[in-house]
């Protein structure tokens, strides 16, 4: 992309954090913004301008073009009752989440998606994270690692972007640039709606197929949160770009959380207790 061999692509930009950890803020970081908050940060909170000041240094421009919403914590061969159960666990996970969990004693591994099922089945892997029920269902992990944990605290709202070479972008006529931006906005709305519509039924099918739903213990989340702050301090000390985007991103989160606590969360909590979840229709005889 930088060299101009490709003019545009569509990806999760945290795949490039090995080059510079600041790329992670485009997609998701541990204990970061949820989907609604991320959209607000990107479009109205200055996130788009700030992040692209960083991206432009590499000769590219990013356009928000999708968000999965909050992701699951993954599939585990054994139950996790506390932080001690994470120590020595062979877990397919990478990026900043992998760094956080490795400091909690997890043995992080990176495997191609096609190799994960066999590794779990053989026991050479104890756990894996992927995305959300709508995607996870297709991989059949519940057959070899039945405990399905939540939340995926490392991806509270995972965004994907269209990324364009700046020179190629500058050569577009104004109306083509407007069409591109409108198409990315449509993709952004469509992706989240697709996942929100598909996840409930997929989760019910997974549970019917043997998945056992579990929440991560709070003690583990507390420990992970503390370690995450250490990781952020260290990365910020090494990268001025990381610190600049980090400080802006989390300042926005601190402003958002009180509002969500007052209204959004209280409404969701009430509805979760008031509405009886829909049950799957009985099988026809």
Image (cartoon, grey):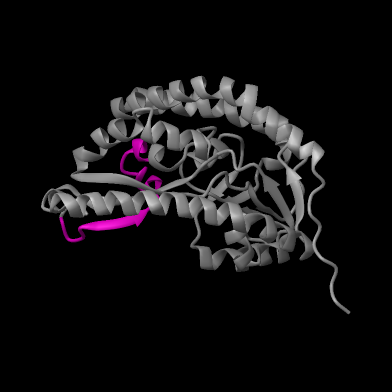
At a point 65% along the width and 27% down the height, the residue shown is 222
Image quadrant holding the N terminus, namely: bottom left
The image quadrant of residue 87 is top right
Q: Is residue 11 magenta?
A: yes
In the rendered image, the residue lying farthest to the front is 175
> Percent x, y for residue 97?
52, 40
131 and 45: which one is in front? 45
> Percent x, y for residue 75?
66, 54
The image quadrant of residue 142 is bottom right
* Left or right: 248 in relation to 220: left
At a point 48% along the width and 54% down the height, the residue shown is 191
121 and 283: which one is in front? 283
In the rendered image, the residue lying farthest to the bottom is 285
156 and 189: which one is in front? 189
> Percent x, y for residue 231?
47, 29
Q: Which residues are magenta?
A: 4-23
* Residue 202 appearing in the image: yes
> Percent x, y for residue 174?
15, 49
Q: Is residue 7 magenta?
A: yes
Image quadrant holding the C terminus, namely: bottom right
57 and 271: which one is in front? 271
Above or below residue 69? Residue 46 is above
The image quadrant of residue 211 is bottom right
* Left or right: 214 in relation to 93: right
């Amino acid at each position: 992309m930088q060299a101009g061999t490709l003019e545009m692509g569509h990806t999760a930009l945290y795949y490039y954090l090995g080059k510079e950890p600041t790329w992670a803020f485009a997609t998701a970081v541990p204990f970061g913004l949820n989907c609604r908050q991320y959209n607000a940060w990107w479009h109205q909170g200055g996130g788009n301008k700030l992040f692209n000041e960083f991206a432009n240094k590499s000769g590219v421009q990013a356009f928000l073009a999708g968000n999965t919403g909050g992701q699951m914590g993954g599939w585990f061969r054994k139950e996790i009752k506390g932080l001690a159960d994470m120590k020595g666990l062979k877990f397919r996970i990478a990026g900043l989440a992998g760094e956080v969990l490795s400091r909690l004693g997890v043995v992080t591994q990176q495997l191609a998606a096609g190799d994960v099922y066999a590794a779990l089945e053989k026991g050479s892997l104890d756990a894996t994270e992927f995305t959300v029920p709508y995607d996870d269902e297709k991989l059949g992990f519940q057959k070899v690692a039945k405990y399905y944990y939540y939340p995926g605290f490392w991806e509270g709202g995972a965004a994907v972007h269209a990324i364009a070479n700046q020179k190629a972008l500058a050569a577009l006529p104004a109306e083509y640039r407007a069409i591109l931006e409108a198409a990315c906005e449509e993709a952004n709305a469509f992706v989240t709606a697709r996942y929100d519509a598909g996840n409930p039924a997929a989760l019910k099918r997974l549970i019917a197929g043997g998945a056992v739903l579990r929440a991560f213990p709070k003690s583990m989340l507390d420990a992970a949160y503390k370690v995450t702050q250490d990781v952020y301090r260290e990365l910020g000390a090494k990268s001025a770009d990381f610190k600049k985007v980090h400080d802006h991103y989390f300042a926005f989160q601190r402003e958002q959380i009180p509002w969500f606590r007052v209204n959004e969360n209280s409404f969701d909590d009430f509805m979760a207790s008031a509405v009886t979840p829909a049950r799957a229709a009985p099988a026809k005889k």
